[in-house]
Image: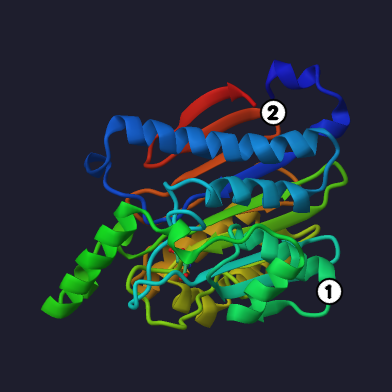
Amino acid sequence: MCARLLHRPSYLANLAIGLHGGCGTLARGLQSEAEWRETREHLAQALRAGWRLLIAGGSALDAVQACVVALEDSPHFNAGYGAALNEAAEHELDASIMDGATLAAGAVCAVRRVRNPVLAARAVLDDGQAVLLTGPAADDFAAARGLAMVEPGYFTTPRRVEALRVQKARAAAGTAAQSSEAERHGTVGAVARDRQGHLAAATSTGGFNNKPRGRVGDTPIVGAGTYARDGVCAVSCTGQGEIFMRRVAAYDLAARILYGGQALAAAADEMVFTTLRNHGIGAGLVALGATGNPVAPFNTLGMARGWIAIDGELTVATHRELHALGPA
Ligand code: ASP
């Protein structure tokens, strides 16, 4: 264990946070080095936003929310600003958040106006009357709670317009199945463990480029794309949502640990490299257990990801190699 940890109060030693920016990372040559650097900086900033709260004694729930808000505000990820467009060239955004201490959860799907969908999900959780709100009603709910609202065009970036054009051309040519993971989709998510040992998870996405209008993926479905339960795990998933829904993937990971007695890393690897790969999909996740460091397996070319481990060291990555950025 790192010497630095010896100088940290022991109650901070079990804090940890991890995130992903989707398993649909672009091939390295498709972005400039400056853009990759900025992508990594945004991952680090998101981690630090959550970590600051954890260090100050804040909850895992607030930490994952802060992380996901930062990623939603970055154009480099498919969530919030810079989210994918559906077949009608509209944004329909999904998000969820779950508190492992109480199993309270909140989610929204197909929202078009709330600037940060994860904040709407959190408002649903806090309100407590529902777990999942849909479409215009979810946007109205967010507006009534005083959350920042935007015109739908706010979420659009030139990259997403181009991605839609490419996907439509592929669909017309009958080659949509050959699209790269990056052309298809992406998502953001975070997991955290706080001073009390509580776990939380949150996920937010634009879904996939050229998705059917009204399509809802795994991201806002508790147990499919997001799950957190104290003493077991917190997990946020990325990949073709329909398969995650059919496998109830996030909950399945928890069940492997809770009922199957598997260790987190082994269960996460089996989920990504065997169970989901057998469906022929690109997949990834970030997960955190009751103790120890986050794990972030993926079976694609790359997955934007990062974590602050229990020794306080911050690491980010977009492809295979890791960038160790030192103490958080
Ligand atoms: N899981 C997301 C969805 O299906 C997409 C992704 O993570 O790439 O909406």
- The quarter of the image holding the C terminus is top right
Work out which quarter of the rendered image holds the N terminus and state it: top right
In this view, 104 is above or below 160: below
Mark drawn on residue 128: 1
Numbered disc 1: secondary structure: loop
Q: Position of residue 53 (x, y in %)?
A: 77, 38
**Scheme of colours in the image:** rainbow
Q: Quadrant of residue 261?
A: bottom right
Q: Position of residue 327 (x, y in %)?
A: 64, 22
Does label 1 point to a residue whose CB lies under 8 Å from ligand 1?
Answer: no
Residue 5 lies, with reference to residue 299, above or below; the image says above
| Image location (x, y in percent) of residue 210 | 32, 73
**Amino acid type assigned to the residue bearing label 1 in the image:** Gly
- Would you identify the image quadrant in which residue 144 lies? bottom right
Q: Is residue 291 left or right of residue 128?
A: left
For residue 51, what is the image quadrant? top right
Q: Camera-side residue: 3 or 36?
A: 36
The answer to whether residue 310 is visible is: yes
Between the residue at mark 2 and the residue at mark 1, the CA separation in whole angstroms equals 36 Å
Residue sitting at x 43%, y 54%? 82
| Residue assigned mark 2 | 311
- Outermost residue toward the front in this view: 151
Seen from the viewer's position, the closer of residues 289 and 128 is 128
Q: Tell me if I can see residue 253 in this picture.
A: no
Q: Position of residue 183 (x, y in %)?
A: 29, 61
In screen coordinates, is 12 left or right of 251?
right
> What's the residue at 36%, 50% (across, down)?
25
Label 1: how many Cα within 10 Å (few below 14, some 14–19, many 20+): few
